[in-house]
Amino acid sequence: MGRPPCCDKIGVKKGPWTPEEDIILVSYIQEHGPGNWRSVPTNTGAINIPTSFLYCLLRCSKSCRLRWTNYLRPGIKRGNFTEQEEKMIIHLQALLGNRWAAIASYLPQRTDNDIKNYWNTHLKKKLKKLQTGVDGQNQDGFSSSQSVSKGQWERRLQTDIRMAKQALSEALSLDKPNSLTDSKDLNLSHPYSRPSQSQASTYASSAENISRLLQNWMKNPPKPAAHQTNSAETMTQNSFNNTTTAGSISSEEGALSATTAEGFDSFFSFNSSNSDNVSHESVSVDQIPNLTPENSVFQDESKPNLGDQVPLTLIEKWLLDDGSAQAHEDLINLSLEDGAELF
DNA sequence: AAGCGAATCAACCGCGTACCA
DNA sequence: CTGGTACGCGGTTGATTCGCT
């Protein structure tokens, strides 16, 4: 009847993730691909990973999914938001409301959590400041989320419908890859045709976080995991601390920053177009058990979703291309026009 | 150098929806 | 159609870091 029962909450670990756990999760996803999160905590014990990591993830599926999507997933851009991103978020928020997942779909390198945090910590204040300065009337012509008018709500609905339509037509014409790059409307419509695209795209970019994680692991292999229960405490004291937990940026960051997008490309041998001219001291794939080029995370995920339908390189190009900045500009302009209609 | 409040952000929680038998 | 479960999302929390006094 239905699906098998969810992970029982007894013995489920909470709190910050340790590098060990990260590696287990990455290894698992690299082998099986994302999704089917429920099986992650139980199946990870069977992964052929370094003996020191040979234990099950004591995390609930939810936590695994969250960790992957918000932190470990390749292609995530961290650090300061650019002005352009900021503008996009502001306009999209005005357009879509607090639907962070939808907004995040326009910013493939940012997670919804990131955007949400950024909105709550930075942009909200910024807009408030702006609003008080103009006495309730926003200079840019958009209002805050708190004052979503009925018209705005209707507008949102219309936008959704329009996007859904476009997504559908995109999906139906997926066998025409060129449609991805030609239409200007694509700028607005692509995110909703994205389920497959976004996955392919995110793997197209770097994943320096994982890279650093694994790199450090190679430098400082952890002690055997008999003391797994203490790992959180002990690991946060060692060099791993700088690589994953809490995303803290330390002095080591500089030294490690060499492992950037292209570094990771070589690391996972993913971006074949770039791998030629890249040579790094970074740990190579075949040094990491299970992280072989043949079954890299990226391939695992990109293949079933898109590889058969749209040439991956095309999407990569689209996403990595500098032209995408122009696409974002277009989107902003479009949103602005929409916003003008709104208010 | 120490204390304290503010800011930041990873992770958790709960709810709604989708999916499966 | 129904009941049960997984998944995904948005809101919230709390630990950590930062900056000021």
Image: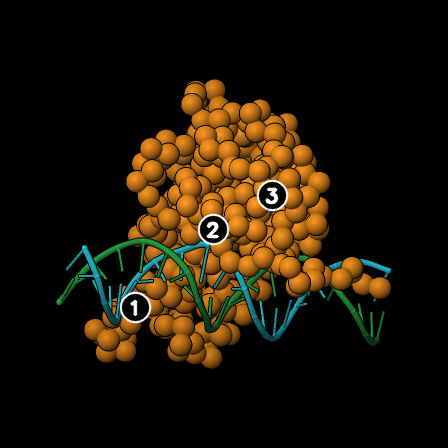
Chain colours: A orange, B cyan, C green
Position in image of residue A251 (x %, y %) = 30, 40
Looking at the image, which residue is at 43% across and 62% down? A116
Number of numbered tags placed on the structure image? 3
Judging from the image, mark 2 belongs to the subunit labelled A
Looking at the rendered structure, the kind of residue marked 3 is: Ala
Q: Which mark is residue A233?
A: 2
> Residue A194 versus residue A290: which sits nearer the camera?
A290
Q: Is residue A124 above or below residue A150?
A: above
> Residue A50 versus residue A226: which sits nearer the camera?
A226
> Residue A321 versus residue C6: which sits nearer the camera?
C6
Numbered disc 2: secondary structure: helix
Closer to viewer: mark 1 or mark 3: 3
Tell me the quadrant of the picture where the C terminus of chain A can be found: bottom left
Numbered disc 3: secondary structure: helix
* Quarter occupied by residue A199: top right
Closer to viewer: mark 2 or mark 1: 2
The crowd level at tag 2 (other Cα within 10 Å; few <14, some 14-19, many 20+) is few
Looking at the image, which residue is at 33% across and 50% down? A80
